[in-house]
Amino acid sequence: MYRLLDTEHMVCCDVDDTLLMWDWYKYDFDSLITIEDPYTKQNKTYGVHKAHVLLLKQYKARGYKITVWSKGGQLHAESAVKALGLEEVVDYVMAKPEKVMDDKSELSSIVGPVVFIDPTLPTETYEETMTLYKSKRPV
C-alpha cells in the first residue's frame, strides 16, 4: 500500500559527508559530534557541516518538507538527525535510494540541482553564502 507525501516542495539531504563529515580532521571544524552506530554499536566521531545544517533549517522555515537519508540505512540517518537536534526540522528519515527509475538519465534532471557548500570555507562565508542563496531561490 502506498502513502501520499503531502508536499510539492521536498529537499532530500544525505548524512555522510554532507551533514556529517567523516574526514573531519582534514578540515577546521569547530564542531565535532560522536554518534553510536545503530548497527555495530561502535562510536564514530564526525565533523558537523554547519552550513548544511543551517541550510536545512532555512529550507524548513520556507515551507519545504525535509528528508534525510543515508546509504548507511535509515537507522544511521535517524541517529544523525537526533544527534544534530534536527527532530523538529526533518519530516522523513529513510535509507538512501539504491536505484531511481525515470525517463531522464541524468540525476539532476530528475531531482533538481545538487547543493553542496565547500566545508573548507570559513564560517562567516557560510552565512554570506546562505544569505545570497536564500535571496536568489524563491520557494
Image (spheres, rainbow, N blue to C red):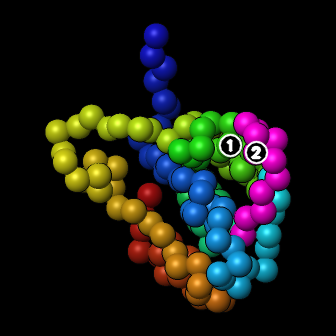
59, 16: nearer the viewer: 16
For label 2, the SS is loop
Q: Is residue 101 visible?
A: yes
19, 34: nearer the viewer: 34
Label 2 crowd (10 A; few <14 / some 14-19 / many >=20): some
Label 1 crowd (10 A; few <14 / some 14-19 / many >=20): many
Q: Residue at x 62, y 36 (%)?
A: 74
In the image, what residue type sits under mark 1? His
35, 13: nearer the viewer: 35
Residue 136: give x, y in percent of width and height: 41, 74
Q: Is residue 63 visible?
A: no
Residue where numbered disc 2 is placed: 37
Magenta residues (range): 36-47
Q: Is residue 46 shown in magenta?
A: yes
Q: Earlier in the sequence, mark 1 or mark 2?
A: 2
Q: Is residue 83 left or right of residue 55?
A: right
Residue where numbered disc 1 is placed: 76
